[in-house]
Amino acid sequence: MARKNPIPKRKASGKKSSKKGSAIKRFLSILKWIIIGFFGSTLFFVVIYRFINPPVTTFMAYRTVSQVFKGEKMQLKKNWIDIEDISPNMIRAVIAAEDNLFVKHNGFDKAAIERAIEHNKKGKRIRGGSTISQQTAKNVFLWPNRSFVRKGLEVYFTFLIENIWSKQRIMEVYLNVIETGKGIYGVEKASKTYFKKSSTSLSPGEAALIAASLPSPLRYSITNPGPYMRSRQAQIVTQMYNIETLKVKK
């Protein structure tokens, strides 16, 4: 006598299929809320920082934790200063050194990026093509190491701050959060540390010296500048009066 196919197996297969479908739905639901949470939280902080000065940045936290893991003394020195009180020389200097088209672009300088790519193909010292807006996004919201993920997030945050903040606010945050020495952040703390005065009264040469160190402030000395720093300082001072600078509204 022929045996009938056991019915329980068919039921078990149906249950497995149902469980698999439920698991996928749960995963998609969790993923949806993760995406919503990410975009919601990032947008929230970008809007908040348009009006409120960030007490500490992701970059600062990363550097501080790195010091602890290396067994070094924890250092985090900064003094916030409103952009209206920063010397125009300092604003001109960073635009001349880092981003000549800052007042004109929408956050990205395509020509600078292309030049950096061509330069780096030659295997020389790595050169970045980041604008001041991109550097601000990286310093406030991201970590310092290079990766495609971080670069993608940098583009995302740059787009947000360019559309939510003003150019003046971007510059103000940038000048207050950039690394200017070991455990030193912002031009005000740098000015007081290296020149014993507020950034309000920085001369063109002093501002240019700070700006010259920005590609690698842990490598280049402001207090004891070498030939490269002096040469770069002179280039920046010359360029400071050949670029369009930011007009600060008081």
Image: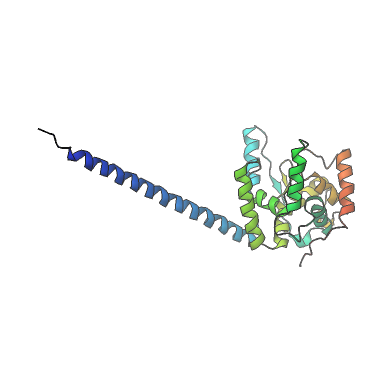
Give the answer, above or below, for where 68 lies relative to 61. above
Please give the count of numbered marks on the rendered protein: 0
Q: Closer to the camera, 73 or 11?
A: 11
Q: Closer to the camera, 243 or 167?
A: 243
Left or right of 137 in this view: 18:
left
Q: Write down the quadrant of residue 200 in the picture.
A: bottom right
Q: Which residue lies furthest to the left in this view?
A: 1
Left or right of 35 in this view: 126:
right
Q: In which quarter of the image is the N terminus?
A: top left
Image coloring type? rainbow
Give the answer, above or below, for where 19 lies relative to 47. above
Query: What x and y, as percent, mark residue 104?
Result: 76, 61
Query: What x and y, as percent, mark residue 158?
Result: 65, 55
Q: Residue furthest bottom?
A: 250
Residue at 49%, 55% (x, y): give it.
36
Q: Write down the quadrant of residue 248 in the picture.
A: bottom right
Query: What x and y, as percent, mark residue 194?
Result: 82, 45
Is residue 54 something one can see in this rendering? no
Q: In which quarter of the image is the C terminus?
A: bottom right
Residue at 22%, 38% (x, y): give it.
9
Is residue 72 something one can see in this rendering? yes
Residue at 66%, 52% (x, y): give it.
137
Query: What x and y, as percent, mark residue 152?
Result: 61, 48
